[in-house]
Image (tube, rainbow, N blue to C red):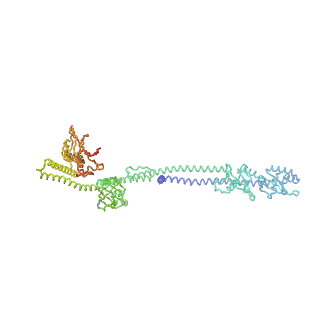
Amino acid sequence: MWTFLNSRFRLHRLRSQLILTFLAGFLGIGIAIGLPVLVLINRQASLQAQLLLNQSVIASKAFIKSEQSNLESLSLLVSQRPTLIRLLQEQNFSALGDYLNTLRDGANLDFVLICSDGKDVTESNQNISLAIFCLEKSQEGYTAVSNEQYLYSSVNMESLQGVSYRVIVGKKMSSILAELQNETGLHYFLIRQTQVVDSSDQAIEINPALIADMLKKANQGTTVSLGQRSFKIGEHRYLPAVLELDPALKIQLISALNVDNQIEIQQSLNRTLIVGLFFIIVIVSALGVWQAQRISRPIVSLADSAANFRQGNLNAPLSIQSSISEISQLTNTLEDARVALEHTMKQLQAEKDWIENLLNSIVEGMLTLDNQNRITFASAGVSEIIGYERDQIIDQKVDNVFLPVDREVAFSAQLPEAGQQRRISVRLRSGQEILLSISKANLIPPEANSANRALVIRDVTNEEYIHRLLGDFMANVTHEFRTPLAALEASSELLLDNLHSLSHAEIEELLTSLNLGIINLQTLIDNLIEAASIEAGRFKVHLQDIPFESILHEAQEMIHPLAQKYGLQLITAPIVESVHVLADQRRTVQVLVNLLSNAIKHSPENGTIQINHSISGETLRIEVIDEGGGVPLEQRKDLFRRFAHLETTNERARQGAGLGLSVVKAIIEAQHGEVGIRDLPNGGNSFWFTLPIVDHK
């Protein structure tokens, strides 16, 4: 199918059509000239052969008439010979026979008969089978004797001694036909009642089928070709003609002209004409192909240039040379159009780039729809929101990009009216559910199959999520403040009311409870303050050259009461050599306290918490390791976000506002460090961060 379509496409090309036109024209001219010439050659050859045959037939007819006349004259001369008359009067038939033989041989006859009363009076010296001529009533004609056909003539003599005599002379038709063949060069066949009784060439064998073919073709006109009119004997072909010799006896003479030479000349002329026409057609067609290419080559180049124009390639100028003025004029016109179009395209491209940059600089996404709800344009903001490249959604139906959630109606059916805004929950093809704020504007005037609506979309999923988190956060903060405050209130009331009656151990326990409550409140307040400053953009760090052991010692002092409460043991790797880091001491202590506080929340009671440190190049790596249950991989991507909580059944691990790790990340990155989590082979949590080292060498 592709081959057929490709062939049709090629036939539609100008060069192909020109070549086909030239070929068809020259072929038609060749046929128009050659066919009549071929017909004329064949007709002329047939006419010439027929003319020659007709002349030969006339000559043959005249020759036979001449033979008949000669026989008449000879019969008359013989009847008047004195010797013949004397011998008949003497009744000397023996001498008469010898005399007649002499006359026969001298006159080149085949027989001379003297008949009386229907009998041969010389039969003693003649072949008795010739006596049949004495019975013939006519004075001349044809008679067959013993498969031999004779032409004869007779004359009646005057009565001698009361007896009437008749002189009959005759010749074999084979002899006559042989003489005729020598005279005319034709072959002759004597036919009597559709049977060949004699021929000029006894070596030729004739069968009834050949006779019928000769008679049939002898009656065909000259409009039939020479090859069709001729018949074949052996390796030769002959053209027949029929001469009626004796209609009463149905004796016919077929003259056969050898037309081998005429047929060969005719075929040679036909071949010469056909070959000549073929070479003329080939040469002229080659010239036509050359001319077609000469005409079509610049046109094809113009078509290629126009295709480049359509693809937007307007930089290359047209430089097509042609001796055809119309093509040169078309080239100049296209070049002018190219220059004008290039200028217009540059202006349009500049405007398009400006509009696209403007649209792409807008955080909100913008897309346009046609009347079939297909996306015709999408800004970079749309790609950021849905996570697909713009090329992937252009020409796609908007309902196939934004899928409905659960049993809701299609996205296009939920669009707001022009100038209004609506929030729509959608599911992307990746399976993610997001909440979009949609506003719509109608484009005026709308055109068929073009954009007629514009949508401005904004992803408000995080806003909604943060709104819910803020509610949870306020509840958590209220709970976080209420619990230590209630403990502080209870402990202080006991100290005030029963101070004199409490033992030293009881007082120490109440003071420890007060201290823990104060530490929790201080940590919570610090994280709230840092989170607020980060959100407000006022978060800053004051980097100083600080020994790391002072940061570690201060953090341990702050977290020790909380670890002691749950029976946890803090194990710190010994510091062999003092390491100075570039950091904000208060905030770095806060980082370490947050990590240790999280480790205490996730560690089982009476467990251990390790604090390791190591030097890697120009950074100090600090790691806090607990014996908790670890952090699943799917929850790690949100671990350092605000208000993030791990999904766990450990009630102690779920306490807090979810700000600690987000504050840790902000402080460490502000100090040009890194923070992360790694897997442990035996489970547990391992949080690490890095600080730049100050070189004192």
Question: Relative to the observer, which residue lies in front, 483 or 639?
Answer: 483
- Which quadrant is home to the C terminus? top left
Question: Relative to the observer, which residue lies in front, 48 or 233?
Answer: 233
Spot the residue most to the bottom: 417
State the image quarter where residue 411 is shown: bottom left
Residue 353 in view (yes/no): no
Residue 231 in view (yes/no): yes
Which residue: 27% across, 47% down? 629
**Residue 664: percent from the left, percent from the top?**
23, 48
State the image quarter where residue 215 is shown: bottom right
Is residue 10 found left or right of 404 in the rendered image?
right
Spot the residue most to the left: 500
**Residue 499: percent from the left, percent from the top?**
11, 50
Question: Relative to the observer, which residue lies in front, 225 or 489?
Answer: 489
Is residue 586 found left or right of 638 in the rendered image?
left
Q: How many marks?
A: 0
Question: Relative to the observer, which residue lies in front, 404 or 283?
Answer: 404
**Residue 687: percent from the left, percent from the top?**
25, 45
**Residue 137: percent from the left, percent from the top?**
80, 58
